[in-house]
Structures are given as structure tokens and as C-alpha cells.
Image (tube, grey):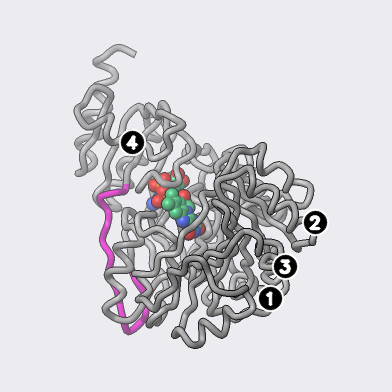
């Protein structure tokens, strides 16, 4: 294409969207295309920074006319597919958060991060089902499932989505609720960014007062006993308790958040307390202050049960990895309301996250289900493993209806049926 032909459509795009537009060679292009994922170096054909739903509509319609795929990015935390050769539509500037304390909901722009919502909701004693990091985007987190320390009590982030406004591949702005576009509403509660660009979300908030949260370290010699105690206790532990067992650096750690005061929390944690800890960061804090360390999901596997053999395998994996973390999910996540979205494998209770090379994690594979969780998945070729077969088929059918040409393909892609 000669330079004039390239320049003309980009000039059109700049006229159509109010936010800035960047082409290779522009000052801001390299800053805006940069990803948090160091393993790839995306080169979109053009980048548009949307400031409103109208900008999003205009940019998507423009991309259709010019036959360009559209990638959507807010923070870049969950971007695993480079936007090479397409339109990179950034929502970062759409960061409004409005809290309605009477209805206990927040209306959140596509570029908002959890820190924004936590700050806006806390003065009302309310909190969202957010994840471990305040810098993660609300839209990507929620549409990818959303696991947080309120999830055992209140479900996945996706279960707390009440409404999404979505610009479809045709450039239409539609509303998805249980009554309006119910198929799309089902799909965005776990199917990721495959069905359009979500311009705003309405999410449920929950009353949350003080929480008791932290990490206690014990000598690694307690690992087998603690993992076995956790396996037996986790299915009956209260929904107020979110707890994992992590192995790293010669320690076994109990990591937990309890929704309640210290006395109740200590009682709930007693079966998982094998003596005096080497270090203990547990404290009563407000929900936004609660900071429990996590394990980077370089490898992630799901398990229907934890056998004694799996306990030994986890301990072996820990010796070759930076960290290994065992989690029991369950609670409200395993009790979906009628019509709940396709998020996760709700009937599979245990997961093991390994921050370490595949060679370290591979001994877990014979015990694992082969399933995954979209938000912790890094391999775009394995998206199907995040769903049950029936849900995946339905997602592909909804994709066919919403985006038959797969305009939104630079993502954890679900191909049209
Ligand atoms: C430090 C860290 C901690 C994390 N902790 C948790 C956790 O506790 N629980 C959990 O469940 N996950 C967690 N995650 C995973 C995280 O939820 C996903 O990576 C999520 O995709 C990030 O969303 P984002 O908007 O910040 O990222 P982005 O890279 O901006 O977006 C990720 C993808 O979401 C889609 N998307 C984003 N916005 C839109 C939109 N408006 N319309 C359509 N599609 C859109 C796109 O497909 C995009 O590729 C964590 C990730 C990190 C890096």
C-alpha cells in the first residue's frame, strides 16, 4: 500500500474518534503498544484510545470497513495474543466508576481497574468481587471469570455481573442483561472478550467490614501433614474463609482471608495451624488493605481430589519450582444460580498453581483433569480447556451470531461455530 493510501483511512479514524490515534512512527505509538507481557512485541497497524462508547462504535465500524481485526486492551495484564496488523482499541481512558450504595451496585467504565472500584465502594462499607491485584482491569477480570477472596461467599466476578453494554462486531451498542440479549449476557460471564467490546459494566457490591488476612509460614517439614489436613478440611470450611496452602523457599504457608473478626478467623483456621509459625502477617484490616501473596500461574492444573500420591507429587514439584500453591475453590462458586455463565469448571474443587518451568509441573499432569481457568490461562491454543464441552459449543454458537467474521480474534479466541 502506498503512503497516501495508508494515510487517508487513518485520518478518517482520527476524525471519527475523540481519543488519540497512533500509527507506527508517531511519538506515542511505542508507549501505547507496549505490553506487560515481555514475551511478545506487538505491532498493531493502528492504535485508537477510546474515550466513550461512541468512540468504540466508531473505531469498530471503521475497522470493519478496512477489514482489520480488532484487539481490545485496558491494562495489558491479560494480553496473551499480539495485536499485529490490526486495530488495537485501548479502553484505558474510560475509567469512570459510579457507586449506588442503595442498590449496592457499581457502574464501571471499560478502563477501570479494581483499585478504582475498591476506593469508590469502601466509604459505603461495600466491596466488589475483585482479585489479588488492584491494578487488574475490571472488564478483563470479570469476563474471564474472576476469582477473588469474596468468591467462596459471593461467587465468581462473572456471577456478580448484572449488566454489560457491548459494541458488537457490527458496530451496534447493545445492552446485555438476563432479559435483554440473554445469550450475549451468558457468554460475557466467562467467555472473555470474544463477543464485542464491553464499554461499561454494572456489578454487584457486597457489605464487607473488617477482614482477617495474611500469611503464616511454617517449616516445610509440616507440608505433608498440612496438605492432608487442608484436603480433608477444605470441603467443610466456612464460605467466609478463602485459604490456600503454598510451598516455597523451604516453608509451607497458610494464606487466607476471613470475612469476619480475628476470633472467628482463628477458630476457622485452627485445623490448619500446626504450631507456632516462623512468620505471621495475619492482621485485621479493611478489605482494600488486605494483601495476601499469590503464586504466578505459569502452570495451572485442576484436580477432582487430592490423593496421598498427589500430596507427595506437590511436595516434589515444590523442590523444582519457585512456588506451588494448592487451592480449594468450592463455596458459592460451586453453587451457581440458574442461568449462570460458562465460567470455570465449577464441580472441580482443587487447583495447583506452579510458578516454575513446565518440566517442574509435568509430574502433576497424570493426576489433573486437563481443565483450566480462562484468567489463569496463557496458551491461546488451549482456550477450549477452560470450559465444559457443552458450554464451549454454546460459546461458539453465540460467537457465530455476534461475530461471524471473527473480528475480535486477537484474544483468547473462541472461533465461530
Ligand atoms: C498481577 C495479577 C494478578 C491477578 N490476579 C487475579 C485474580 O486474583 N483472580 C483472577 O481471576 N484473575 C487474576 N489475574 C488475571 C486477570 O484477571 C486477567 O489477566 C485479565 O484478563 C486481566 O484483565 P485486564 O483488563 O487487566 O487485562 P487486558 O490485557 O487489558 O485485557 C485482557 C483481555 O480481556 C479482554 N478485554 C479487556 N477489556 C475488554 C473490553 N472492554 N471489552 C472486551 N474485551 C475486553 C480482551 O480480550 C483482552 O485481551 C491476575 C493477573 C495479574 C497480572
Q: Of tags 4 and 2, which is closer to the observer?
A: 2
Nearer the observer, 110 or 282: 282
Disc 1: which residue: 233
Q: Of tags 3 and 1, which is closer to the observer?
A: 3
The answer to which of marks 3 and 1 sits earlier in the sequence is 3
Majority secondary structure in the magenta region: loop
Q: Magenta span covers which residues?
A: 91-106
Nearer the observer, 142 or 152: 152
Q: Secondary structure at mark 1?
A: helix
Q: Is residue 110 magenta?
A: no
Q: Residue at x 39, y 69 (%)?
A: 290
Nearer the observer, 352 or 370: 352
Quadrant holding the C terminus: top right
Count neighbours of disc 1 (C-alpha within 10 A) and say few if under 14, some if 14 to 19, many if 20 or more: some
Q: Which mark is residue 183?
A: none
Q: Are marks 4 and 3 in contact (CB under 8 Å)?
A: no
Q: Is mark 3 within 8 Å of ligand 1?
A: no
Count neighbours of disc 2 (C-alpha within 10 A) and say few if under 14, some if 14 to 19, many if 20 or more: few
Disc 2: which residue: 309
Residue 86, position as x, y percentages in the image:
40, 30
The answer to which of marks 4 and 2 sits earlier in the sequence is 4
| Label 4, label 3: how far apart the Cα atoms are | 57 Å
Residue 258, position as x, y percentages in the image:
49, 77
Q: Which mark is residue 62?
A: 4
| Label 1, label 4: how far apart the Cα atoms are | 55 Å
Residue 14, position as x, y percentages in the image:
21, 35
Q: Are marks 1 and 2 in contact (CB under 8 Å)?
A: no
| Label 4, label 2: how far apart the Cα atoms are | 56 Å
Disc 3: which residue: 228
The answer to which of marks 3 and 2 sits earlier in the sequence is 3
Amino acid at each position: 500500500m502506498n503512503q497516501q493510501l495508508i494515510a487517508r483511512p487513518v485520518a478518517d479514524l482520527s476524525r471519527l474518534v475523540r481519543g488519540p490515534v497512533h500509527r507506527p512512527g508517531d511519538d506515542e505509538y511505542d508507549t501505547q503498544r507496549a505490553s506487560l507481557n515481555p514475551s511478545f512485541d506487538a505491532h498493531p497497524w493502528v492504535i485508537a484510545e477510546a474515550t466513550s462508547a461512541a468512540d468504540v462504535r466508531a473505531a469498530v465500524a471503521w475497522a470493519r470497513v478496512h477489514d482489520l481485526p480488532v484487539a481490545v486492551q485496558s491494562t495489558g495484564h491479560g494480553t496473551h495474543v499480539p495485536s499485529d496488523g490490526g486495530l488495537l482499541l485501548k479502553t484505558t481512558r474510560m475509567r469512570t466508576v459510579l457507586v449506588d450504595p442503595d442498590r449496592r451496585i457499581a457502574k464501571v467504565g471499560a478502563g477501570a481497574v479494581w483499585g478504582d472500584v475498591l476506593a469508590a465502594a469502601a466509604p459505603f462499607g461495600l466491596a466488589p468481587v475483585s482479585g489479588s491485584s488492584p491494578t487488574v482491569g475490571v472488564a478483563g477480570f470479570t469476563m474471564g471469570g474472576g476469582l477473588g477472596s469474596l468468591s467462596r461467599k459471593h461467587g465468581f466476578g462473572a456471577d456478580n455481573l448484572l449488566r454489560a453494554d457491548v459494541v458488537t462486531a457490527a458496530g451496534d451498542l447493545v445492552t446485555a442483561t438476563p432479559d435483554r440479549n440473554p445469550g450475549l449476557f451468558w457468554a460475557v460471564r466467562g467467555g472473555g472478550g470474544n463477543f464485542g467490546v464491553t464499554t461499561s459494566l454494572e456489578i454487584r457490591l457486597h457489605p464487607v467490614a473488617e477482614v482477617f488476612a495474611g500469611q503464616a509460614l511454617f517449616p516445610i517439614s509440616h507440608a505433608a501433614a498440612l496438605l492432608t489436613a487442608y484436603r480433608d478440611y477444605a470441603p467443610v470450611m466456612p464460605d467466609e474463609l478463602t485459604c490456600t496452602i503454598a510451598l516455597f523457599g523451604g516453608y509451607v504457608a497458610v494464606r487466607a482471608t476471613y470475612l469476619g473478626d480475628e476470633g472467628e478467623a482463628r477458630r476457622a483456621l485452627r485445623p490448619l495451624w500446626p504450631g507456632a509459625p516462623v512468620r505471621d502477617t495475619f492482621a485485621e484490616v479493611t478489605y482494600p488493605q488486605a494483601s495476601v501473596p499469590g503464586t504466578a500461574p505459569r502452570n495451572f492444573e485442576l484436580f477432582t481430589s487430592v490423593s496421598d500420591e498427589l500430596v507427595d507429587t506437590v511436595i516434589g514439584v515444590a523442590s523444582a519450582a519457585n512456588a506451588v500453591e494448592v487451592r480449594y475453590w468450592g463455596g458459592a462458586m460451586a453453587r451457581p444460580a440458574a442461568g449462570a455463565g460458562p465460567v470455570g469448571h465449577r464441580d472441580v474443587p482443587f487447583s495447583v498453581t506452579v510458578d516454575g518451568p513446565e518440566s517442574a509441573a509435568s509430574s502433576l499432569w497424570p493426576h489433573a483433569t486437563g481443565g483450566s481457568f480462562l484468567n489463569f490461562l496463557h496458551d491461546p491454543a488451549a482456550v477450549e480447556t477452560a470450559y465444559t464441552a457443552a458450554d464451549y459449543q454454546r460459546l461458539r454458537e453465540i460467537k457465530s451470531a455476534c461475530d461471524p467474521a471473527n473480528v475480535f480474534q486477537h484474544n483468547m479466541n473462541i472461533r465461530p461455530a
